[in-house]
Image (spheres, rainbow, N blue to C red):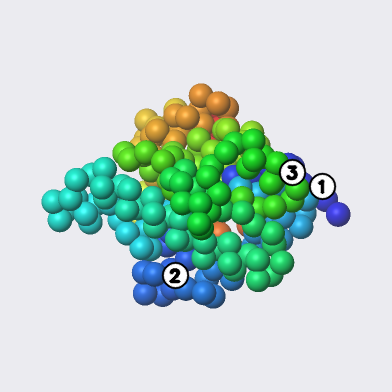
Amino acid sequence: MTQPKYKLIMLKLSGEALAGPEGFGINAQRATDIAHRVKEVRDMGVQVGIVIGAGNLWRGRVGLDMGMDQATADYMGMLGTVMNALALMDAMEKINVETRVQSAIEMRAVAEPYIRRRAIRHLEKGRVVIFGGGTGNPFFSTDTAAALRATEIGADILIKATKVDGVYDSDPKNNRQAKKFEKISYIEALNLRLAVMDSTAVSLCMENKLPILVLNLWDKAALPSAIRGEHVGTLVSD
């Protein structure tokens, strides 16, 4: 069997990955599908951390449009990420993948508090760790939380799993001539304002030389192929 190229990965999922066709809420089948994809990678001997968004439950800009204070709207989103983390943990443990949820916002009845050394120990024991609660601070996205946690735990790569097969210069749904980038530098991604991750997350990865790989989560072959070092999606690096 081909040895994995990466020992430790951080997987960034959008909240919408858990939503069904309606685009809202938590769909049990979607959670199960994601769990199986994670299990396949974990069974390759790879340590897996996960950060998941909350767009399927709450979007801060909806609150802002209602006149809500941004910090309050952001905290609500952070709570939503913990709900998604618990749903994904349940799906993983149903297929015998030992999983822990750690939250940047303490809620000890449902999740461990985020403790870096404890998270690393879980990963070393073969457990999947899902990091909920964002960074624990308003005004930061879950993209930034993923970059931060990936850096803290020493991940080899940050994989942003989306519903498209890479990064394009324009929306491929609206432009058939959209150009896909095979590789791109951090600076180019920032200067061209490409929809890789938000600028804070990309800058943090650049400062810590953490590569970002954007791929299609729903292509069953994409994630394991990427772990083996095969060319998949778009790589953002130096």
Please tell me which residue is depicted at 65% across the width and 49% down the height of the picture.
Answer: 48
For marks 3 and 2, the one nearer the N-term is 2
In the structure shown, which secondary structural element does the residue marked by tag 2 occupy?
loop
The dot on residue 26 is 2
Q: CA distance from mark 3 to mark 2?
A: 29 Å
Query: Where residue 96 appears, x then y in whole percent?
Result: 71, 67
Q: CA distance from mark 3 to mark 1?
A: 18 Å
Please tell me which residue is depicted at 70% across the width and 41% down the height of the picture.
Answer: 121
Amino acid beneath label 3: Glu
In the image shown, does 56 or 116 lie closer to the viewer?
116
The dot on residue 124 is 3
The dot on residue 3 is 1
Q: CA distance from mark 1 to mark 2?
A: 34 Å
Amino acid beneath label 1: Gln
The dot on residue 238 is none
Residue projecting furthest to the right: 1
In the structure shown, which secondary structural element does the residue marked by tag 1 occupy?
loop
Please tell me which residue is depicted at 47% across the width and 30% down the height of the picture.
Answer: 204
In the rendered image, is residue 167 in sight?
A: no
Query: Where residue 60 appears, x then y in whole percent?
Result: 28, 51
